[in-house]
Image (cartoon, rainbow, N blue to C red):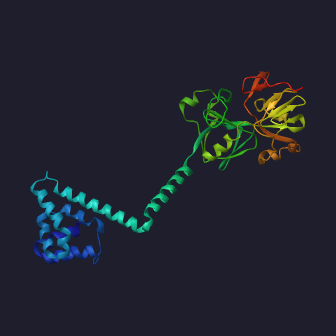
């Protein structure tokens, strides 16, 4: 750069025509370029107007190219506060922007609007793809494998490291925790330690929790399982929108044997207490449930018409009714 500037400056004093050809040839690529062609005009900032005047007279192409900036330079040298050269630079920047827009239209063709819409849709899809949701899990309940977690026992995805019994379970709008049975593989994007000081102060086991980042679709699919229960079908009588147990039995969060489940995964159902359903009982289709034992085919999956109302006795919850606050009738 310094060599080119020096050559142009000296030639402009001694041999104006040669100086013009030197810069013109450099711009045209006839000699090795030492400065990007699109940025060549910024070289003018290193020279004075009187040094460039001979270049304007050297050839018609240089005159058309440099007449305006040389004039602006003269005005700025006469009055540095007038902003003439800065105004010219702004005009050049606007012309460059116009050129970029023209080139983009040429690339997109006549369907430029559609092209922009397509690009916007792709950007929105990318945003959805990159979006994640963070949850807390209790580390000892999970086996960590590459790209996934596998539940060792029935456990929870939680919005905080609080104890699970302190959090509300519900649908997508108000759920603070989501249940997952044993043996479920959950794809995760990232796993990290709990670093929030407020979370770490909740209790002494908060440090044993992990933070996990999941795709929203995974969280939505787990939320969709809210209200799902399993039962041993030979223990029940089907009465249309209700089922009635013929013996004392259980509502279970998994098809596992009741003796294998933790107390929070069971609800004790007294004989004859009718249970209102949101739909007919379904066969068990979940892959992680179908192969737990040889009696899974005798189980059914049900969704309750309203949340269960329970009372606690010892460690277990006992069903006394459903979400309307009234006890279910005892079947006769």
Instruction: Report the side of 312 relative to 206 (left or right).
Output: right
Pick out the residue farthest to the left.
78
Pick out the residue farthest to the front.
240
Closer-to-camera residue (124/26): 124
**Residue 316: image location, x then y, percent:** 79, 25
Could you tell me which residue is drawn at 15 percent across and 60 percent down? 72
Closer-to-camera residue (170/244): 244
Image quadrant holding the N terminus, namely bottom left
Could you tell me which residue is drawn at 36 percent across and 63 percent down? 101
Closer-to-camera residue (62/7): 62
Q: Reply above or below: 286 against 108.
A: above
Instruction: Report the side of 116 relative to 47 (left or right).
Output: right
Image quadrant holding the C terminus, namely top right
Instruction: Report the side of 96 relative to 205 (left or right).
Output: left
**Residue 222: image location, x then y, percent:** 68, 42
**Residue 258: image location, x then y, percent:** 84, 34
Q: Reply above or below: 88 against 331.
A: below
The answer, for residue 91, to whether it is visible in the render is yes
């Amino acid at each position: 750069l310094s060599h080119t500037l020096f050559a142009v400056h000296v030639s402009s004093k001694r041999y104006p025509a040669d100086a013009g050809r030197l810069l013109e040839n450099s711009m045209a690529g006839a000699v090795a370029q030492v400065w990007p062609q699109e940025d060549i005009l910024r070289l003018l900032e290193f020279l004075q107007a009187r040094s460039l005047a001979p270049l304007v007279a050297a050839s018609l192409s240089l005159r058309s190219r440099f007449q305006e900036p040389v004039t602006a330079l003269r005005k700025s040298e006469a009055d540095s506060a007038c902003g003439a050269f800065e105004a010219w630079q702004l005009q050049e920047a606007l012309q460059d922007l116009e050129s970029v827009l023209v080139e983009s239209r040429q690339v997109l063709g006549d369907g430029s609007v559609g092209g922009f819409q397509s690009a916007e849709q792709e950007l929105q899809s990318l945003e959805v793809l990159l979006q994640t949701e963070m949850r807390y899990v209790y580390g000892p309940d999970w086996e960590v494998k590459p790209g996934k977690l596998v539940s060792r026992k029935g456990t929870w995805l939680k919005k905080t490291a609080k104890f699970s019994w302190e959090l509300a379970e519900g649908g997508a709008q108000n759920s603070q925790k989501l249940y997952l049975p044993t043996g479920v593989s959950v794809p995760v994007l990232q796993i990290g330690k709990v670093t929030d000081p407020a979370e770490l102060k909740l209790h002494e086991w908060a440090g044993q929790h992990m933070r996990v980042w999941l795709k929203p679709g995974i969280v939505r699919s787990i939320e969709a399982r809210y209200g799902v229960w399993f039962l041993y079908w030979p223990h029940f009588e089907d009465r249309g929108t209700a089922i009635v147990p013929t013996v004392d039995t259980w509502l279970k969060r998994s098809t596992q044997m009741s003796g294998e489940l933790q107390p929070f995964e069971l609800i004790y159902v007294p004989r004859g207490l009718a249970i209102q359903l949101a739909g007919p009982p379904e066969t068990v289709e979940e892959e992680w449930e179908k192969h737990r034992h040889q009696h899974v085919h005798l189980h059914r999956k049900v969704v309750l018409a309203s949340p269960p109302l329970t009372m606690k006795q010892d460690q277990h919850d006992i069903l006394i009714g459903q979400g309307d606050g009234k006890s279910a009738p005892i079947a006769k």
